Amino acid sequence: MSETGGNDADFALDHGLLRRRFARAAATADGADVLAREIARRMDERLDYIRIEPKRVLDLGCGTGADLPRLAQRFPQACVLAADFAMPMLARAGQRLRDGAPAPGLLRRLLGGKPAPLPHVAADARRLPFARGSLGLVWSNLMLPALDDPLPALQEIHRTLEVGGLLMFSTLGPDSLRELRDALPRTAGERVHRFIDMHDLGDALVKAGFADPVMDMEMLTLTYSELDGLLSDLRATGAANAAVGRPRGLSGRSGWAQARAAYETLRRDGRLPATFEIIQGHAWKAAPKTTEDGRSIVRFQPRPTPR
């Protein structure tokens, strides 16, 4: 499998380590997640051009819940659900909801506009605890980079979406953090997280059963006064390299000194760049063409009534 990660050791991730890192990041992610906040804004703008009125919305990989108020505001009549695999993240999301996210629809009116907690559940994206066809929209902002193979999660999302339901997602492409990747020594394995190519992600969407996937890519560059600022943000958000084959350490002080010197050559106007390849997309769950046992489904339309 070329870049989808399922059979490529370079993409194999230590999921236990990921869970521990994201659990620790619950206390530090807010304020360090400027990239995720900007992408959420852009994802929300895309919904301006998509006609959908879901009854149930899932924020999959919700983190500390920063996107939940946005979703509750856009879909005031919907039940907004939150899911993440790190319990401390969910606890922070629940607290955010209690502190001020608006309650949707009738519940908001009954409570006189007071905040109300929204449902949030611990869940692995590859094994979602939701019934088939129970969701109208799945929103996933930068959850996919935590998967070494996106296909099982996309299949689960497809299963839980109703016919006509929408997956709206963002992820990072292979050119993300290219400056850091080039600055660090490449002996004994990749030192920077590997990211799945947009075309392979599109193939996985189709294989999972989605219809008409639409994706685009753009480059976004953050700048830092020092390299330590970038490294601190990566640690604070739980986004440090979690590859199974990652090398440990940088050969002491000399290794770090060489990496810092290499990165320093990129400084422009007093700032160091950190480039991210942003992939955004959406895909619909179409009516099935076959039954689960492989038989074709033939749909008959009623004859028009003679006038």
Image: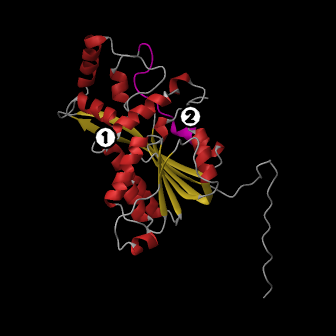
Name the residue tied to disc 1: 27
Report whether 133 appears left or right of 146: right
Q: Are marks 2 and 1 in contact (CB under 8 Å)?
A: no
Principal secondary structure, stretch drawn in magenta: loop
Which residue reaches farthest bottom?
Answer: 307
Q: Position of residue 229 (x, y in %)?
A: 24, 32
Sequence-first disc among 2 and 1: 1
Magenta region: which residues? Answer: 187-202
Is 172 positioned to the left or the right of 25 in the image? right
Where disc 2 sits, the SS reads loop
x, y (%) of residue 186?
Answer: 40, 16
* Most foreground residue, 23 or 143: 23
Dot label at residue 53: none
- The quadrant of the picture occupied by the N terminus is top right
Q: Amino acid at mark 2?
A: Asp
Query: Whole-Å distance between the Cαs marked 2 and 1?
Result: 28 Å
Of the pair 178 and 149, the residue shown nearer to us: 149
Dividing the picture into quadrants, the one containing residue 255 is top left
Q: Residue at x 39, y 64 (%)?
A: 73
Element type where label 1 sits in the image: loop
Residue 196: percent from the left, percent from the top?
Answer: 51, 34
* Apparent side of residue 34 relative to residue 55 in the rendered image (left or right): left
Type of amino acid under label 1: Ala
Q: Point out which mark residue 149 bears.
A: 2
